[in-house]
Image (cartoon, rainbow, N blue to C red):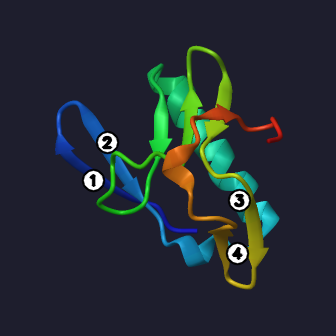
Amino acid sequence: MRVNCHFFTREEIELDIEPSEVDSEARCLSLLAFIKGIAERVGKDVIMTPENMQETVLLRYRAGEGRFEHTIRRIQLRPNRLIPADRGLRKRGPRPLNSKR
């Protein structure tokens, strides 16, 4: 999986991936480990958003609390991509990754 790194401002590092490359559980777990590693090394939260939609946070790793939270109700693994199972993402608040709703 390729990760592109951009330094558009001093306060922010932007990394982008091609979602179609997250096509297996192993790659998804690698991506989560990468996000966690960055957050813990810089001591700041890391968020994952759709491209050009910074206000739509899909996943957040809270560095100070050592946990992920997400706003996606469920993710289904489909050939060549991970997709949200529903589209009502903005109506739900963040919750820990292991919680059920």
Disc number placed over residue 6 in the picture, else none: 1
Residue 84: x %, y % from top left: 64, 65
Cβ atoms under marks 1 and 2 closer than 8 Å: yes
Callout count: 4
Instruction: Identify the secondary structure beneath mark 4.
Output: loop
Q: Which mark is residue 13?
A: 2
Q: Secondary structure at mark 2?
A: strand
Q: Say what amino acid the circle numbered 3 marks.
A: Cys
The residue nearer to you, when weighing 43 against 51, is 51
Q: Amino acid at mark 2?
A: Ile
Residue at the (71%, 59%) spot, across then down = 28
Which part of the image, by quadrant, shows the C terminus? top right
Which tag is nearer the camera, tag 1 or tag 3? 3
- Secondary structure of the residue carrying numbered label 1: strand
Instruction: Tell me whether circle 1 and circle 3 mark residues in contact (CB < 8 Å).
Output: no
User: Which callout, 4 or 3, points at the residue further toward the start of the chain?
Assistant: 4
Residue 75: image location, x then y, percent? 72, 62
Instruction: Give whichever of discs 1 and 3 has the lower sequence position.
Output: 1
> Residue 28 has which mark?
3
Q: Amino acid at mark 1?
A: His
**Separation of residues labelled 4 and 1 (CA atoms):** 24 Å
Mark 1 or mark 2: whose residue is earlier in sequence: 1
Left or right of 40, for residue 43: left
